Amino acid sequence: MSNQMKASQNETKKRTIVEIADGITVGGRSLLIVAGPCSVESEEQMEIVGSALRGQGVSAIRGGCYKPRTSPYAFQGLGEEGLNILSNMSKKYSLPIITEVMSEKQADIAVHTADVLQIGSRNMQNFELLKHIGTLRKPVILKRGLAATLEELVSAAEYILAGGNTQVILCERGIRSYDNQTRNVLDLGGVVALREMTHLPILVDPSHACGRRELVADLARAAIACGADGLMIECHPDPEKSVSDARQAISMQDMIDILRSIEPIAHAVGRTLCSPHLIKPVQETPDAENAGNNVHKMNGYESLMAELKDLRREIDRSDSKIAALLEERLTLAIRVGELKQELKIPSRDVAREREVIDLVGLSCSDPRISAKVRSIYERIMEASRQLQVENSLPSRVA
C-alpha cells in the first residue's frame, strides 16, 4: 500500500479525531457509543429509544431508513418518513443520528437530516457511491465488507478521502467464515492491525459480527479493551418483535448494562464515555403529556441527580488517572534516590522542592486551587522521601 495514501498511518502516529456533533467526537479519548434499532419502525419506537438512552453515555442513535435486505420481499425501510422520525427524535433528545445510505440519491436526501452517513458492508466497494460521499463533507462510517481484507477496507476509505471528505470512520463488523456458530467472525486482531495501518478512527459492531444477543456484551467489552474507538450496537424496545435482525438485537436495559460494564475497561485503557451532563435538556412539546407512558420525562430533580451522578463518574475517572500518575512519579523519585546515592551527593535539595511547588502552583489558573495543589505537593514530596528511606536510600526528593 502506498505511503502517499491519505488513509495511511504517518510517522507521527497522530490519530484523526472526527467531530460528529457539538462536543461529540471519535478518535480521541472519548469513546463513540452508537446504539439503536436496525430499522426505524415508528415514531413511538424511536421515542422510547431516545428517552431510554439519553444521558446514559450513548453518543449517537442509529436507525436504518433504507435497508439492504437479502430478500427483495423483506422490509426495506421507511425511507424519508423514517428520516423525519429520526429528525424529530434528534431534536427532542439532542442526540445525533446515524443512518445508512445505499445510493447517491439516498445520500443526497439523508445528508440534510443525518449527522453521520453509514456505508454498509455490501457497499464497501461501491466505488461510485464512495466517490459521491467524498463530495458531501459529512462524517461517514465505512463498514468492512463481508470478506474484505484490511487493505481493501483502507483502500475503500481512500476513495472518500480522495474526494475531499476527511471525516471517515472505519467499522469492523465481522467477516464471513465456515463456522455457523456466529453470524460472522469478529476480527479484533484486525482492529489492532488497523490502528497501525491508518490514522482513521475505528468502531466495532459486535451485533452484526455475532448475530446472537447473548454474545454482544462480551464482544463489546473485548473491543474496547483492544483499542477500538467506539461501538455500534443494535438495541430495540422489544427485541423479539424487531422487523429486522431480531436475533441480534438487545433490550434497552441490556444496552445500559453494557455501558456500565465497559466503563472500568475504558478507564483502564485511558478512554472515557460520552458525558451526559453535556447533553442539552429535553425539549418538551405542548402535547408531551400525551406522548405515552413508555416515554420517560426527566423532571428538574431527576435532571440534577443525573448530572450529579455523571460528575461523580468524571471524578472517578480523574482519580484513576491521578493515581496512575502519582505511582509513576513516586517510582521515578525512588530511582532518583538511587542515582543520588551512587553519585554521593546530598539526599535532599530544599531549593528543588521549592522549585517544584512553585511550578505546580503556577500551572493552576485559579488562585484558590493553586494554594491547595501546593499543599498537596508538599505531601507528595514527603511521601517520596519516605519511599526513598524505605528503599534504604537517601531521602532526597526528585
Image (cartoon, rainbow, N blue to C red):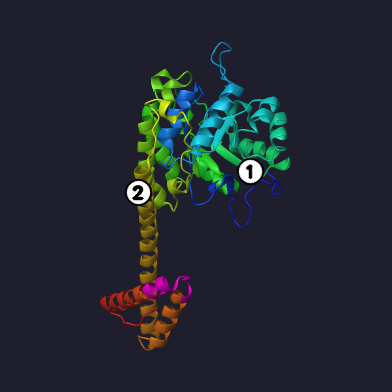
* Lower position in the chain sequence, tag 1 or tag 2: 1
Residue projecting furthest to the left: 390
Residue 357 is labelled as none
Give above or below for 271 relative to 371.
above
Q: Which residue, given by chain and number where applicable, does mark 2 sit on?
A: 309
Residue projecting furthest to the top: 73
Give above or below for 388 relative to 227.
below
The amino acid type found where label 1 is placed reads Gln
Residue 167 is labelled as 1
Classify residue 285 as left or right of residue 165: left
Mark 1 element type:
loop
- The quadrant of the image that shows the C terminus is bottom left
Relative depth, front residue between 341 and 357 = 357
Residue projecting furthest to the front: 286
Answer with the quarter of the image where residue 220 lies. Answer: top left
**Mark 1, other Cα within 10 Å: few <14 / some 14–19 / many ≥20:** many
Residue 117 x, y percent position in the rendering: 61, 34
Question: In the image, which residues are magenta?
Answer: 362-373
**Mark 2, other Cα within 10 Å: few <14 / some 14–19 / many ≥20:** some
- The quadrant of the image that shows the N terminus is top right
Mark 2 element type:
helix
Work out how far the residue at label 1 is from the one at label 2, CA to CA, in angstroms.
32 Å
Residue 199 magenta: no
Give above or below for 28 relative to 365.
above
